[in-house]
Amino acid sequence: MGNISIFNQSVYLVVTYLSIFLLFITCLYASVGNKQAKGIWLLFWGLMIDFFSLYISVHSAEVYAKGNSVEIWVFLEMLFCLVSMLLLAMASSHILVKNASNLPIVSVFGGLGLFAIIFFLYIYPDNQMIAQMRYIFPLTGFTYLSIGCFSQMNKKRSSAFVLAGLVTMSAAIVMLLKLLGFNYFIYGVWYTTPALYIMLSLSMVMLKADSFARKYDESCIEIEKDNQRIEEIIKYSPFPIIISRLSDDRIILANSNAIKLFDISAKELDRYHFKDFFADADNRRILGELLEKERVVQDFEILVKTPTGNTPFWLLASANIIDYNYDVALYTAFQDITSRKNREVLLKNQATRDPLTSLYNRRYFEEEVFKRIVESKTNNEPFSVLMIDADHFKKVNDTYGHKTGDKVLIELASTCERALRNDDIVARYGGEEFVVFLAGVNALKGKIVADRLRESISNIVVYSDEGEEVRFTVSIGVSSYEISDNIDTLIKTADEALYKAKENGRNRVEIFDKNDLEAFDNKEMQERIKNEVNNRHPIFDKEENAEISLLDGIEANHIQGENTNIEDHKKEDEIDYPILGVDEEDLK
């Protein structure tokens, strides 16, 4: 293909070398990750060997001008032309047929070409035939290569092969013109060789672009297949599933189960936002934070609502960030756990609530108030405890029956809940006793609250089964943080104040203040001493014996022990068991 005129001036030669370097760079770029990389490099080296044959031709002309023999140089020139033709033909075979075998091409064309070179150079010398072979070999190689490029025109993304086919076909036409003797058309046109290299470089860039476009098309097809598989999975899934776009949170896909669950329109999915179904904004925020951190969230409980309904319900959600329809989306599957949550609430209420009044029970009160006291101390806030007891409750039970007594307790509990704040804790402590924790309230304000509560309760009217009006009052004891920060002590001191209110006539409120601490401490000490005496082990009674004999005293001690047991049995017979459920104060 080359023209020896490029060696006439250094500028021509430099431009040609630059075009060769450009071709090398583009071949290197186009071959990375390309299935036709081998064909690209066969083309490059075929062109380079063709260019090197030009150099040998120029050198042989210089040797001939000096009067020396040029047979060996002509043989090398022809051999390089033959190798260039074989490489171009092999490059074409890789384009025509993927993973084609090069052995037939090398064997047939190489064998015939080598025989022709030897025959016309050494056996039957023919200078005219040798000159024609300079064009026949490149003509055959470029023709074969152009056919291989044009064979790819029917495929998608084949613009690079079309350009390469036009360029190589043009090179083949130039070789044909030279072979037919029309050199005057192209004689002295030095730039045909660098132009060929530059155009082929452009086709290599286009080949890489087509490769990217082809991969993009393949990825689009794969994405489409994945989307179809996802849609099939969602469609036939027994669980409600929603896919929402992560950028604007709009729902883009939902199966029939999800449409029924959230009561939405299948034809207007894009007008719904996934966040709109959350009944709790914090619930949504926590889910978003977990997705940002993990990208996958399993078994997350969410409280949701429908666009048309006001009653929230519980769902168990599993969410995953996926690529869907050329966008980043959130895939969420749901399971309705409303019945399970209702059972959990029921069990929790059974564990923490009093079955009659629905107030908190004693255990919950003590555990929760312990936390509240710690919180109040941290914030340096006051707190108080009220102990409430229904006056003459035994008389109500005896006069009107236990059903009426239960009504009294229920109304008393209901009044306490209505009269107090949401932050206050009301609990049934036992029997007709109720206990209240007031956060942020000192003893004086606690007494004001207790008096108002006492007055409200005194206005309650309960009707017996016979329709009789039943009115009742309460006595209330108040203790505060000024006395102690221990829940047990607060309850005991509030109970002491309640006892004082009972002694002072009932239907009143009494405060346990610091002046009552000394009497309370003495009473506590007396109770401890009494408990120690009652719980004294019998072995210590033997310390009063003046003498213990190891031999003779056995019988005496045995008799003494029998007598002691007899006396103990007599005492047990004299003890009366207390009546269950009867308060000592009511008996008075």
Image (spheres, rainbow, N blue to C red):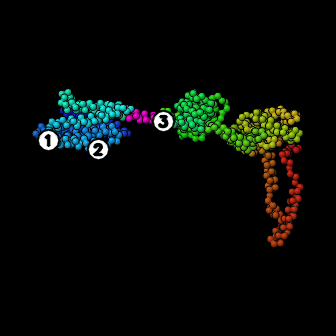
Q: Nearer the viewer, residue 99 or 410?
A: 99
**Residue at which label 1 appears:** 124
Q: CA distance from mark 3 to mark 2?
A: 41 Å
Query: What residue span does the magenta drawing correspond to?
Result: 211-226
Q: Is residue 107 left or right of residue 567?
A: left
Residue 15, position as x, y percentages in the image:
25, 32
- Which labelled disc corresponds to residue 103? 2
Give above or below for 3 relative to 562: above
Magenta segment, principal secondary structure? helix
Mark before the other along the chain sequence, 3 or 2: 2
Location of the N terminus (image quadrant): top left
Asked if the magenta segment contains residue 213, the reply would be yes
**Element assignment for label 2:** helix
At mark 3, the secondary structure is helix
Q: Amino acid at mark 1?
A: Tyr
- Whole-Å distance between the Cαs marked 1 and 3? 67 Å
What residue sits right under mark 3 in the picture? 225
Q: Quadrant of residue 195?
A: top left
